[in-house]
Amino acid sequence: MLKLVGMSNCNPIATPIDPNVKLMPLTDGDLCISNTKFQHDYLSGLGKLMYPAVTTRPDLAHAVQHLSQFSI
């Protein structure tokens, strides 16, 4: 799954989302908001995480739900 979204070299962590990180929505001035490839990759990655989040990983479900709020 990581290879499909281009993150095969990422470092593993113990928790799905850092509770101390404050996420902010993108604005029109941000570079990646107009980048359709970024939008596709972000939504594709979230979609790939939906099945394991709903069926086997309740801890991952919270992270996916939180990140879904920022889908463009």
Image (cartoon, rainbow, N blue to C red):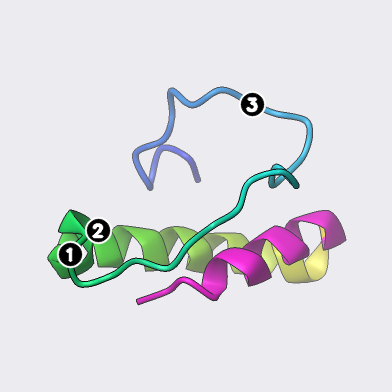
Label 1 environment density (alpha carbons within 10 Å; few <14, some 14–19, many ≥20):
few
Describe residue 51's horizontal placement relative to residue 36 as left or right. right
Which residue: 42% across, 74% down?
A: 71
Ranked by sequence position, the earlier of labels 2 and 1 is 1
| Picture coordinates of residue 2, whole percent (x, y) | 48, 40
Q: Which mark is residue 40?
A: none
The answer to whether residue 34 is magenta is no
Label 2 environment density (alpha carbons within 10 Å; few <14, some 14–19, many ≥20):
some
Which residue: 64% across, 67% down?
A: 66
Task: Name the element at disc 2.
Answer: helix
**Residue closest to the eye, 41 or 4:** 41
Describe residue 12's horizontal placement relative to residue 6 as left or right. right
Q: CA distance from mark 3 to mark 1?
A: 31 Å
**Residue closest to the eye, 16 or 9:** 16
In this figure, which residue is indicated by the disc labeled 3?
A: 12
Q: Which residues are magenta?
A: 58-72
Label 3 environment density (alpha carbons within 10 Å; few <14, some 14–19, many ≥20):
few
The answer to whether residue 62 is magenta is yes
Task: Name the element at disc 3.
Answer: loop
Q: Is residue 27 above or below residue 60?
A: below
| Picture coordinates of residue 35, whole percent (x, y) | 15, 63
Q: Amino acid at mark 2?
A: Phe
In this figure, which residue is indicated by the disc labeled 2?
A: 38
Q: Nearer the viewer, mark 3 or mark 1?
A: 1
Which quadrant of the view contains residue 64? bottom right
Task: Name the element at disc 1.
Answer: loop
